[in-house]
Image (cartoon, rainbow, N blue to C red):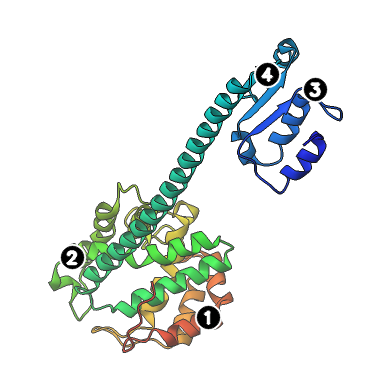
Amino acid sequence: MKSLKKALAWSETNEPDLVLIDYVMPDIDGLEFIERFRAIHKSYQEIPVMILTGDIDNIVSHKGLIFDINDFLIKPIDEDELFTRIKKLLLFRECQIESSDHMKWLEIEIRKERIELIQSEKEMVLRLSKAAEHRDPETGQHLLRMANYSRLIARELGLSECEQVLILEAAPMHDIGKIGTPDMILLKPGRLNEEEFFIMKQHAVSGYNILSNSYSLLIQTASIVALNHHEKFDGTGYPNALKGEEIPFYARIVAVADVFDALTSERPYKKAWSLDDASQFLRDNSGSHFDPKCVEAFFKAWDDVLEIHALYQDDVIVDSI
């Protein structure tokens, strides 16, 4: 093209393999063209540029642009040398494209492997949770309900979608430490005595020990929830008698969801409480057992709570974590 401005306009919608320009042109000079051409698109930073000039000093003086030029040829032009250099630059461009395509392929493969890894991690989490569940009178539906209740609370508290999913997937591991609790205590139909209750309380620390020191954010979160979901807002909980905001946020959320579902579920040692009675328990213990903000958030989502309670009944098998 005889006009570099026309060449720039053409480049807006067409990506060249190589740019060959004369330094001296009637509308704009070659160096200005290069600067404007490189700015059109990020990918244009990689397109080879050769400039033809009769005065190399003019080019070298523009230190900021000299690195944007891949090659230059001094006039008068030797055609054989010109074509040889063009071939080299086109080969260079071809190698660039192949390398870029390979990197894109690698990115896709890495993304696929990451998705598979996350899915495997989630499956392991669910299997671990169910392993504890098989030794516990609590049902798998309890895990689904309390996990979904936890997500509702997180949503009402303004947590991001990613954080909501994180607590949904971490919550089912809250009682993983019960794997190590003796059957005579775990399955006892009546109230535990002081010694038995002391042993039962160890499941919080056991769960933390099972899950801690993981590189996975999900497992790290689950370990914190497992350790702290029996802490109480007034500092009378276990295992560390943490108080108020000393208790990790996710654990405060799970505490509300877990207790509500435990109260409204039938166990060998108790009948299920009514929704009204369980709701009143949360309200009565807001600020003592539970974080008031979490209790308030739970009731803001009450319609969704009722929907989850109806959907995941103990005689209905639904797997959606």
168 relative to 29 in the view: left or right = left
Real-space Cα separation, disc 4 to disc 1, in angstroms? 77 Å
Nearest to the observer: residue 189 or residue 44: 44
- For label 1, the residue is 304
Camera-nearest label, 3 or 2? 3
Q: Secondary structure at mark 2?
A: loop
**Where does the image place residue 10, in percent across and percent down from the top left?**
75, 44
Q: Residues within 10 Å of mark 3 (few under 14, many from 20)?
A: some
Residue type indicated by callout 2:
Thr
Q: Secondary structure at mark 3?
A: loop
Q: Residue at x 58, y 22 (%)?
A: 80
Q: Residue at x 54, y 30 (%)?
A: 87
Real-space Cα separation, disc 3 to disc 4, in angstroms? 14 Å
- For label 3, the residue is 24
Q: Which mark is residue 77?
A: 4
Q: Earlier in the sequence, mark 2 or mark 1?
A: 2
- For label 2, the residue is 181
Residue type indicated by callout 4:
Ile
Camera-nearest label, 4 or 2? 4
Camera-nearest label, 3 or 4? 4
Q: Residue most toward the top?
A: 57
Q: Residue at x 34, y 88 (%)?
A: 316
Real-space Cα separation, disc 1 to disc 3, in angstroms? 71 Å
Residue type indicated by callout 3:
Val
